[in-house]
Amino acid sequence: MTESSSTAPAPCVAAHHEPSWREGVKTGMPSLFGIGAWGLVVGIAMVKSGLTIPQALGMTLVVFAGSAQLAALPLIAADAPVWVIFLTALVVNLRFVIFSALLAPHFAHLPWRQRLTLGYVSGDMTVALFLQKYPSAAPQVGKLSYLKGLLYPNWASWQIGSIAGIFLGSAVPPEWNLSFAGTLAIICVMIPLMVGRPALCGVLVAGAVSVLAHGLPYKLGLLTAVLVGMLSAMVIEETAEKWRSKRG
C-alpha cells in the first residue's frame, strides 16, 4: 500500500452525506437562538468596554469564544497587564483542549487544514451533541457531515448576533444593563452540558469560588474559579473511575 493511500481520508467519514448534514442542522437548531442572543450581548459588551468597531469585529471573528471574550473585556477596560488578559482567556478556554482530545480519534485521518478549520468553528454545545450521537470513534457514514451540520450554523448564529451587537452597541442605553441577559444566555447553553456528577460538581465549586474570590484584583477571582472548578471535576471523575474499577 502506498503512503498516499494509507493517509487518505476514509470515504465513509469524509465524503459529504446529505441526510447526516440535515440531521446535524436539525439537532443543533434549538440552540441557535441562545447562541445568537449570547453573541448579541457579547458584541454590545465589546463596544461598551471601549473597543472600536474594527477591534470588536476582529475579536469576534478571530477569537470566537464568548466566555473568553467576556472574561477579557473587564481586564482590558481596567488596563490589566497583557499577560493577565492572555492567561485568563487561555484558562477559560482550556476546555477546548478536552474537546480536541475527544474529537481527535474521530477525525485524526483528515488533513491538518481541515482539522484546524473544524477546531476553530467547534463550540461547547456542538461537541456535546456530536459525542451524544457518535460516542464511538469507529468510522461511520456521514459522521463528518453531521458534525459540519452542527458546527457551521452555530458559528454563523454567533457571528450574526455578535456583529449585530457590535453595530447596535452605541445605540443601547447604559441603563439597560444587558450583562444579565448575557448571563442568562450562557446558562441556557451551559445547563445541557452539565451531564454527570463531575460536571455538576465542577460548576458548583467554580460558582462558589468565584463568589468568595470576587474581590481579587484584575478579575483574578474568575481565573481562580475556573481552575478550581476544572480540578474538582477532574478529581471526582478520576475517583469515580477508580471506584468503578475496584467494584468491577
Image (cartoon, rainbow, N blue to C red):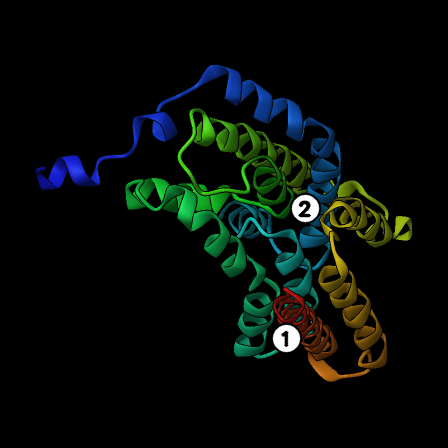
Please report whichever mark, 2 or 1, sits nearer to the chain's N-terminal start: 2
Quarter residue 154 falls in: top right
Where is residue 99? Give x, y as percent: 53, 53
User: Is 30 positioned to the left or the right of 139 in the image?
Assistant: right
Amino acid under disc 1: Asp
User: Is 90 positioned to the left or the right of 34 in the image?
Assistant: left
Which residue is under mark 1? Answer: 79
Which residue is under mark 2? Answer: 43
Where is residue 235? Give x, y as percent: 66, 75
Which residue is pictured at 76% across the width and 84% down the height? 216
Give the answer, above or below, for where 202 lies relative to 32.
Answer: below
Where is residue 71? Give x, y as percent: 67, 64
Q: Identify the secondary structure beneath mark 2.
A: helix
Q: How many marks?
A: 2
Give the answer, above or below, for where 28 lies relative to 54.
Answer: above
Give the answer, above or below, for where 133 lies relative to 84.
Answer: above
